[in-house]
């Protein structure tokens, strides 16, 4: 099976000289569910944001279905971007708009800017948006204002919006970091179910090692911008975790307990 995503010797040096990523290479097949883990500042967000060109890389190439996104411009960039859906920690919804309108926004990449500005969505797009909202149990909230939803409900809307694009790759940047444990489980279950049903690749930045182990088919561990682990969850031993986080398991569980309080 062809790779849907390839990183070839990718480095990112920020203007102030900080290295976000250092010589990162890996490739991803359709259907893989990858958790990207590592301490704060390890480069997880830089890695995800480079894939849809929310930021440029300094060196190397990133290929999406064989096309180089790192140098694409104009309509070529837009067409590659359509293949990549993104779910954000802080949801990125337009709060004064309805749930349905927020989900329809996922279609903007397919419309002319005039159609988008006038909010002229096709009937079939509206049907699709409703179906997606039903798939994530939000069918009763179509006309609710996004501002009035709970955090977990907002994230479901964010997920439905990403799927409106019919992406080949779903990127989730700390999707459960702002949620309570029960909502976090619902959201992870949904992301997993929706990506595996469609057999698309998913990359999720997580700082919860437990969630990474229970959902991912593969884990990539970053430390200081470098990939220090790449393998199945069964190989993520305590020693591997200590290597990624540069601290003992004991210290890590104390920190996790503190965060939970
Ligand atoms: P993570 O998501 O794992 O917390 P990031 O990708 O946000 O890590 O950051 C990786 C490194 O790049 C960190 O040292 C961070 O301080 C630095 N960094 C991130 N964004 C910027 C920026 N816009 N300018 C300068 N340095 C940055």
Image (cartoon, rainbow, N blue to C red):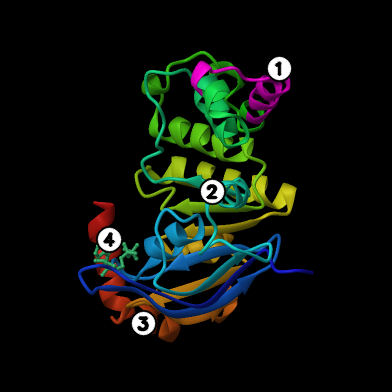
Q: Of tags 4 and 3, which is closer to the observer? A: 3
Horizontally, residue 69 falls left or right of residue 209, namely: right
Q: Is mark 1 on a helix, strand or loop?
A: helix
Horizontally, residue 81 falls left or right of residue 196, namely: left
Q: Of tags 3 and 1, which is closer to the observer? A: 1
Vertical order, 139 against 187 (above or below): above
Chain part drawn in magenta = 117-132
User: CA separation, marks 4 and 3?
Assistant: 17 Å
Residue that mark 4 sits on: 257
For residue 131: magenta? Answer: yes
Visible residue check, residue 112: yes
Near-viewer residue (158 or 252): 158
The x and y percentages for residue 254 are 25, 68
Assess whether mark 1 and mark 4 are in contact (beta carbons under 8 angstroms).
Answer: no
Assess whether mark 1 and mark 3 are in contact (beta carbons under 8 angstroms).
Answer: no
Q: Quadrant location of the N terminus? A: bottom right
Q: How crowded is mark 4: few (under 14 residues within 10 Å), some or many (20 or more)?
A: few
User: CA separation, marks 1 and 2?
Assistant: 28 Å
Work out whether mark 2 precedes mark 3 in sequence or the reverse, and give the earlier one: 2
Assess whether mark 2 and mark 4 are in contact (beta carbons under 8 angstroms).
Answer: no
Residue that mark 1 sits on: 123
Assess whether mark 3 and mark 4 are in contact (beta carbons under 8 angstroms).
Answer: no
Residue that mark 2 sits on: 74
Vertical order, 207 against 240 (above or below): above
Residue that mark 3 sits on: 242
User: CA separation, marks 3 and 1?
Assistant: 52 Å
Q: Of tags 1 and 2, which is closer to the observer? A: 2
Q: What element carries label 3?
A: helix
Q: Main secondary structure of the magenta part?
A: helix
User: CA separation, marks 4 and 1?
Assistant: 49 Å
Horizontally, residue 200 falls left or right of residue 156, namely: right
């Amino acid at each position: 099976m062809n790779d849907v995503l390839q990183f070839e010797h990718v480095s990112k040096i920020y203007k102030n000289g900080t290295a976000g990523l250092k010589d990162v290479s890996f490739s991803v097949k359709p259907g893989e569910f990858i958790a990207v883990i590592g301490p704060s500042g390890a480069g997880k967000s830089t890695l995800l944001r480079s894939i849809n060109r929310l930021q440029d890389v300094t060196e190397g190439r990133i290929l999406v279905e064989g096309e180089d996104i790192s140098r694409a411009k104009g309509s070529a960039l837009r067409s590659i971007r359509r293949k990549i859906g993104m779910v954000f920690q802080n949801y990125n919804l337009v709060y004064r708009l309805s749930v349905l309108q927020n989900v329809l926004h996922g279609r903007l990449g397919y419309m002319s800017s005039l159609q988008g500005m006038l909010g002229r969505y096709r009937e079939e797009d509206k049907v699709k948006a409703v179906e997606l909202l039903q798939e994530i149990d939000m069918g009763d909230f179509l006309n609710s204002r996004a501002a009035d939803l709970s955090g977990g409900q907002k994230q479901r809307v964010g997920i439905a919006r990403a799927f409106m694009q019919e992406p080949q790759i779903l990127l989730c940047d700390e999707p459960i970091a702002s949620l309570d444990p029960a909502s976090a489980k619902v959201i992870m279950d949904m992301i997993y179910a929706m990506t595996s049903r469609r057999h698309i690749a998913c990359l999720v930045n997580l700082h919860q090692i437990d969630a990474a182990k229970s959902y991912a088919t593969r884990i990539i561990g970053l430390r200081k911008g470098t990939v220090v682990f790449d393998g199945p969850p069964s190989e993520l031993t305590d020693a591997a975790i200590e290597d990624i986080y540069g601290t003992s398991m004991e210290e890590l569980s104390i920190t996790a307990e503190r965060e939970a309080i």
